[in-house]
Image (cartoon, rainbow, N blue to C red):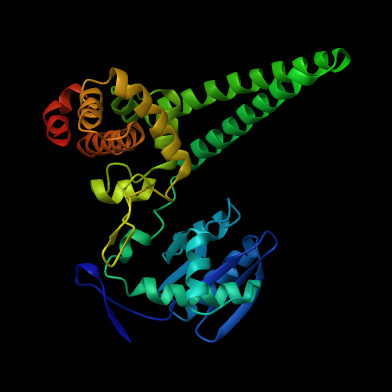
């Protein structure tokens, strides 16, 4: 069966779904089902099987990193991989009447989902971006830093209720964690300077965008500057979503997207609404028009993300981008 794809290209072939577990992978394509180990040998076997039957699109869920080895192996083999949010797969499965859940059933659901996405007129937006080893390392450092910060906060809560004999141990633990955070901050700074220096300068030139925001945008949003403003807003989860039905017009709200990126954009917008020469008057104009502060702040998040996206796209810092920024702020 031929399928007309965006850009005029034509592609044919079956599609596949892969359910990822810690120890194994469940593959499903055409009428075939096979379980292979989630290790280099299993990855190679999956590549050969998919190549043999000329599989077009392979869909898998994001599983917190368990899928990374297979993803890289498939991409290195030139196969098209789509990594989706597990919620999307669950919703698709329920819509298709699949209420039971096993690894093999999940693989079948992902195969059927791949059949849909392969025919989508904008299928390119679902394709997992090529692996960037430097960005992968930076993301790992970011995740570890977040874990350490959470540990420090937890120990701080324990310290408040601790009795004297245990306070000394908790304080020692906090001191060790702070040393670890300081060490990882130095490693992050060095890695960004060596590999993403130009991008860092562009982002940090905006008032409200600090070190943590820069780290998160570089590590967790490689699409920044590559998508249009609507697509990047939806990806992060700051685009207003409609809740209309018939004559009913519900309130727009934001939902989904990349929570870690949305969190730092929120913190940056909090600062920007008081100090940024573009975001501040934008926030004041919205509140003066009667918008609730929360709604105005979300609009500021979206505006700030749009500006950053345009700056990265044009490879220009704040001052060099004033004309574009002024147009976006209107």
Residue ranking furthest to the front: 247
Q: Quadrant of residue 293?
A: top left
In the image, residue 165 above or below residue 301: above
- Residue lying at 38% horizontally and 60% vertically, measured from the top left: 127
Report x, y in % for residue 310: 22, 38
Q: Quadrant of residue 207?
A: top left
In the image, residue 8 above or below residue 143: below
Report x, y in % for residue 325: 17, 31
User: Is residue 292 rendered to the left or right of residue 108?
Assistant: left
Residue ranking furthest to the right: 165
User: Is residue 166 rendered to the left or right of residue 192?
Assistant: right
Report x, y in % for residue 244: 31, 61
Q: Which is more toward the observer, 291 or 53?
A: 291
- Residue lying at 20% horizontally and 28% vertically, measured from the top left: 285
Q: Which is more toward the observer, 197 or 94?
A: 94
Q: Quadrant of residue 115?
A: bottom left
Residue 321 appears in view:
yes
Q: Image quadrant for the C terminus?
A: top left
Q: Which is more toward the observer, 207 or 240?
A: 240
User: Is residue 275 rendered to the left or right of residue 256?
Assistant: left
Q: How many marks?
A: 0
- Residue lying at 43% horizontally and 78% vertically, measured from the top left: 54
Residue 195 appears in view:
no
- Residue lying at 67% horizontally and 29% vertically, measured from the top left: 151
Q: Which is more toward the observer, 109 or 70?
A: 109
Q: Image quadrant for the N terminus?
A: bottom left
Report x, y in % for residue 87: 51, 61
């Amino acid at each position: 069966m031929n399928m007309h794809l965006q850009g005029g290209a034509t592609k044919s072939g079956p599609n596949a779904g892969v359910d990822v577990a810690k120890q194994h992978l469940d593959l499903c394509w055409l009428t075939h089902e096979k379980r292979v180990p989630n290790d280099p040998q299993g990855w190679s076997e999956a590549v050969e099987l998919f190549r043999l039957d000329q599989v077009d699109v392979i869909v898998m869920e994001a599983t917190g990193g368990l899928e990374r080895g297979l993803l890289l192996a498939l991409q290195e083999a030139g196969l098209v991989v789509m990594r989706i949010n597990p919620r999307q797969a669950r919703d698709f499965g329920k819509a298709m009447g699949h209420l039971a859940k096993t690894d093999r059933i999940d693989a079948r659901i992902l195969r059927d989902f791949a059949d849909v996405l392969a025919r989508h007129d904008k299928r390119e937006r679902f394709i997992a971006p090529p692996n960037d080893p430097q960005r992968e390392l930076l993301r790992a450092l970011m995740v570890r830093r977040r874990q350490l910060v959470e540990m420090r906060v937890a120990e701080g809560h324990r310290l408040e209720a601790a009795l004297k004999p245990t306070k000394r141990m908790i304080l020692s633990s906090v001191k060790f964690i702070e040393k670890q955070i300081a060490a990882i901050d130095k490693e992050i700074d060095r890695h960004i300077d060596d590999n993403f220096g130009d991008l860092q300068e562009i982002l940090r030139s905006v008032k409200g965008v600090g070190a943590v925001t820069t780290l998160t945008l570089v590590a967790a949003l490689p699409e920044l500057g590559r998508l249009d403003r609507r697509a990047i807003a939806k990806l992060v989860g700051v685009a207003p979503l409609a809740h209309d039905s018939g004559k009913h017009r519900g309130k727009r709200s934001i939902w989904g997207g990349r929570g870690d990126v949305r969190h730092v954009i929120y913190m940056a917008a909090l600062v920007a609404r008081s100090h940024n020469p573009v975001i501040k008057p934008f926030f004041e104009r919205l509140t003066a028009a009667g918008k609730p502060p929360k709604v105005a702040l979300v609009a500021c998040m979206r505006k700030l993300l749009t500006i950053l996206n345009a700056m990265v796209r044009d490879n220009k810092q704040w001052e060099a981008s004033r004309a574009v920024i002024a147009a976006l702020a209107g």
